[in-house]
């Protein structure tokens, strides 16, 4: 069963002097328990597509469906809060919060008590293979690979079934990139998440369950 579905998704950027047709009719389904890679040259529409899946905007034409309901029929803020978690290339951790506080943040936004959130954060940090001693450190004290693992732990704390990641290994060396990919793959295969990553790395893309290749806003595969 598809948890997420794209139906003839089109997106046009409208600026004062020109229009850019970034997506020209993308149709694709995404299941839980699978890892998908979106690949394509720079400018092919990858980030735009992921943004629509993340509910940052609506397609100009066509639909993004989550659990059979079009995002155009939903409150997008609620969709972003409850249905999808996003991981970014540059981690986007809060620098003035500790690792534990970063991971606890979305839980506390949902009203979870600090003590319970801290416990859950400790479990999630362990799940992404970070030592418990990392909990009270600040992000800048960690390596890039470790920071990305914190970002994944924070995303998991949102309790969504869908994880979207735009170039999650883009700022990491090969070994750390492999490690992050393996964690995301495990979350799909072992924990049943629907994981969608944008990647430039053909080696990683070849290990995805399915590859969606974009070229000038059109899907090649
Ligand atoms: N905010 C924007 N305003 C206008 N055009 C944009 C904007 N963002 C992206 N584009 C254009 O849309 C197309 C797809 O961009 P993008 O989705 O960022 O591609 P990718 O992530 O594959 O590099 C490109 O032609 C890009 O120049
Ligand atoms: Mg991009």
Image (cartoon, rainbow, N blue to C red):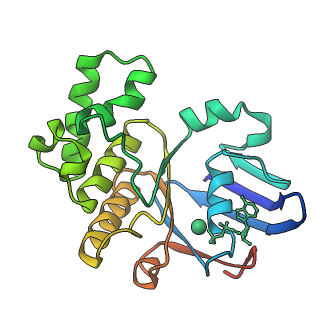
Give coordinates of residue 209: x percent, y percent: 48, 72
Image quarter of residue 71 = top right
**Left or right of 204, for residue 124:** left
Is 74 placed above or below 130 here?
above
Q: Residue at x 29, y 78 (%)?
A: 174
| Residue drawn at (26%, 67%) of the image | 179
Which residue occupies 84% across, 55% down?
A: 62
Q: Pinpoint residue 78: horizontal percent, then vertical percent.
A: 62, 30
Side (left or right) of 162 relative to 78? left
Task: Relative to 136, say whether 61 is above or below.
Answer: below
Q: Is residue 213 left or right of residue 87?
A: right
Residue 21 appears at what percent x and percent y? 83, 68
Q: Position of residue 89 (x, y in %)?
A: 44, 61
Say which of 215 and 1 sits in front. Answer: 215
Quarter holding the C terminus is bottom right
Residue 159, picture quadrant: top left
The image quadrant in which ligand 2 is located: bottom right
Residue drawn at 38 percent across, 22 percent down: 108
């Amino acid at each position: 069963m598809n948890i997420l579905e794209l139906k003839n998704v089109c997106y046009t950027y409208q600026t004062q002097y020109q229009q850019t047709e970034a997506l020209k009719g993308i149709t694709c389904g995404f299941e839980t328990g699978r890892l998908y890679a979106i690949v394509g040259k720079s400018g092919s529409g990858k980030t735009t597509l992921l943004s629509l899946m993340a509910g940052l905007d609506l397609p100009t034409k066509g639909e993004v469906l989550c659990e059979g309901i079009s995002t155009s029929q939903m409150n997008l803020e609620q969709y972003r809060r409850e249905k999808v978690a996003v991981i970014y290339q540059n981690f986007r951790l809060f620098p003035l919060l500790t690792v534990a506080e970063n991971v606890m943040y979305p839980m506390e936004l949902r009203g979870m008590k600090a003590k319970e959130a801290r416990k859950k954060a400790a479990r999630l940090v362990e799940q992404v293979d970070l030592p418990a001693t990392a909990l009270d450190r600040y992000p800048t004290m960690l390596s890039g690979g470790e920071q990305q693992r914190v970002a994944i732990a924070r995303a998991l704390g949102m309790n969504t079934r869908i994880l979207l990641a735009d170039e999650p290994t883009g700022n990491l060396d090969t070994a750390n990139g492999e490690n992050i990919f393996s964690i995301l793959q495990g979350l799909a295969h072992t924990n049943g998440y629907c994981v969608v990553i944008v990647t430039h790395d053909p080696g990683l893309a070849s290990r995805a369950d399915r590859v969606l290749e974009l070229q000038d806003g059109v899907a090649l595969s």
